[in-house]
Amino acid sequence: MRSTIPKLTLIAVLAFLAGLGCRLIVRTKQRNTVPDKYAKDADTWWIWGENTYAGAYELFHPKKPGLWFSAAVLGHQALEMLLKAALIRKGHSVIQGDVWGHNLTKLAKLMASETAGFPPDIVANVGIFSDLFDELRYPKKLKKVEGLGEQEGKLLTTIVRVLRPYAKGDK
């Protein structure tokens, strides 16, 4: 079947769509520095973090090692949300130049620097999940991750128990 759309019309449509795509990319980059309604909404970040943790917890089931890669990536996301909720409660915003990115160690160090009594071992322990996230979210050769097992599931639960009061606003 032959197309009934003239070639010039098709080229014009494609050019229009390409231009629209470029404008969307520019807008997306600009949006990162302008707070949206969730940039300071600690409760939403905390609730999403808790729900994401619940999913990771289920995936770290001891009899389902095939799900542990997904559990580790989801666990990282949960920790990121809980740390961001806690930092929002400290007056930060989730925007570029403030609380941004996926580096859990950086987020935990910021939290520790602003919070008396914040457990120092949390900074090192969240780094394990940053390494897992960096190496397991896409197929590639592993450099930092040497293994993955039930112990990461237990570590995730331990970290969440420490972060929860800060993210929830109880501390």
Image (spheres, grey):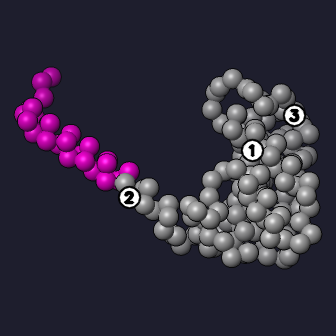
Identify which residue is drawn at 70% across, 50% down.
Answer: 103
Q: Who is closer to the viewer here, 159 or 123?
A: 123
Pointer 1 residue: 130
Circle 2 Cα neighbour tier, 10 Å, few/some/many (<14 / 14–19 / ≥20): few
Find residue 92 and report its image quarter: bottom right
Pointer 3 residue: 149
Q: In the picture shown, does residue 122 fall above or below 1?
A: below
Q: Looking at the image, can residue 49 be seen? A: no
Indicate yes or no whether the magenta region holds residue 31. no
Indicate yes or no whether the magenta region holds residue 8. yes
Pointer 2 residue: 27
Q: Which of marks 1 and 3 is nearer the N terminus?
A: 1
Q: Earlier in the sequence, mark 1 or mark 2?
A: 2
Amino acid tagged 1: Ser
Amino acid tagged 2: Arg
Q: Distance between the residues labelled 1 and 3?
A: 16 Å
Q: Main secondary structure of the magenta part?
A: helix
In this rendering, position of residue 170 left or right of residue 38: right
Single out the mark in the foreground, 3 or 2: 2
Identify which residue is drawn at 72% across, 68% down.
Answer: 87
Residue 85 screen position, x and y as percent: 71, 67
In this rendering, position of residue 12 left or right of residue 123: left
Residue 69 screen position, x and y as percent: 74, 35
Identify which residue is drawn at 73% across, 58% down.
Answer: 107
Residue 109 screen position, x and y as percent: 79, 59
Stretch of the chain drawn in magenta: 1-25
Q: In which quarter of the image is the C terminus?
A: bottom right
